[in-house]
Amino acid sequence: MLAKDLTDTEYFYGHKACPGCALGIVCRLALKVCGPRTMLVLPASCASSVTAVYPQMSVLTPQMTGSFPATGALLNGLAAGFQAIGEEGVTVLGIAGDGGTTDIGLQSLSGAIEQGRNFLYICYDNEAYMNTGIQRSSQTPIGATTTTTPAGSRSYGEKTRKKNLFEIMIAHRIPYAATASVSYVNDFVNKLKKAKETKGPAFIHVMAPCPTGWGFGEDKTMEIGRMAVENGLWSLMEYQDGKVTVNLTAGDPPKPVREYLTAQRRFRHLNEENIAEIEKVRDEELAIVRAWRNV
């Protein structure tokens, strides 16, 4: 399935997100693929804040907003409910940020996957808690400055590497898991279609660059997302039938990370030593991806 094959019908519009926000792309494409028979769940997040501003709703399918940590539990309960009443053909869809997924919502998501019911969970990863003031999350990359990991004389920003959510999902032996990027629309749309058609829980971790939190021009969202892949800081992969497939990753050697880092305000304080450390971590993570590619 390609983007050009999508319906012209819009199920998501009129939102109040920041200009250039990748979240709008994620929601728009996900609802186009999933269609009108979708039950959408949003936690407290950028997604809920910009789509449900009384009295205006930006989603044309049924939608509920739950508590911050409960997206997985709500999806599981809804899937169980539809199953109990024999209601078929409904896509139970959750869209949550990285903080609500990899931090406060991880236990709920893990428990929901264990139950094995039919739902699709999308984590849009903008690498911080953007809705509440740009605090760090476990998806904030090394070196990034946030309001809780500020750069200064005693710190150069975030010091720990990103939690590998894709590997965590694989550890659950989930029927389908994937990484994606809004900058590679056809890849994302194809994975959405596979996830929708999966029997059992499906998960997509999609990179969603944030102009406000990352500090780049609102017209650069797609470019920044592509640079992340070309510089080896993000790879496009999927897990299905017990096998990992690498769809796209950086070349060998990858482009230097400097181009990507200097394009964003959150990294502009970094010195040569800091950049070298980031490249070292990048190379270690890429080695794992290339090992999967060669299996």
Image (spheres, rainbow, N blue to C red):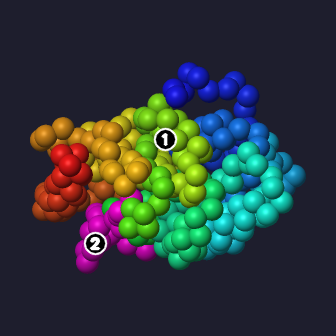
In the image, which residues are magenta?
A: 142-168
- In the image, residue 295 sits, relative to residue 158, either above or below, namely above
**What is the crowding at mark 2: few (fewer than 14 residues within 10 Å), some, or many (at least 20)?**
some
User: Which marked residue is nearer to the observer: mark 1 or mark 2?
Assistant: 1
Q: Amino acid at mark 1?
A: Lys
- The residue at which mark 1 appears reads as 191
* Rendered residue at 17%/59% (across/down): 284
Question: How far is the residue under mark 1 from the one under mark 2?
Answer: 32 Å
- In the image, residue 199 sits, relative to residue 43, either above or below, namely above
* Rendered residue at 41%/50% (across/down): 240
- The residue at which mark 2 appears reads as 159
User: Can residue 54 be seen in this snapshot?
Assistant: yes
Which numbered circle lies on residue 51? Answer: none
User: Can residue 121 be seen in this snapshot?
Assistant: no
Mark 1 vs 2: CB contact within 8 A: no
Q: Earlier in the sequence, mark 1 or mark 2?
A: 2
- In the rendered image, which quarter is residue 111 located in? bottom right
Disc 1 is placed on an element classified as helix
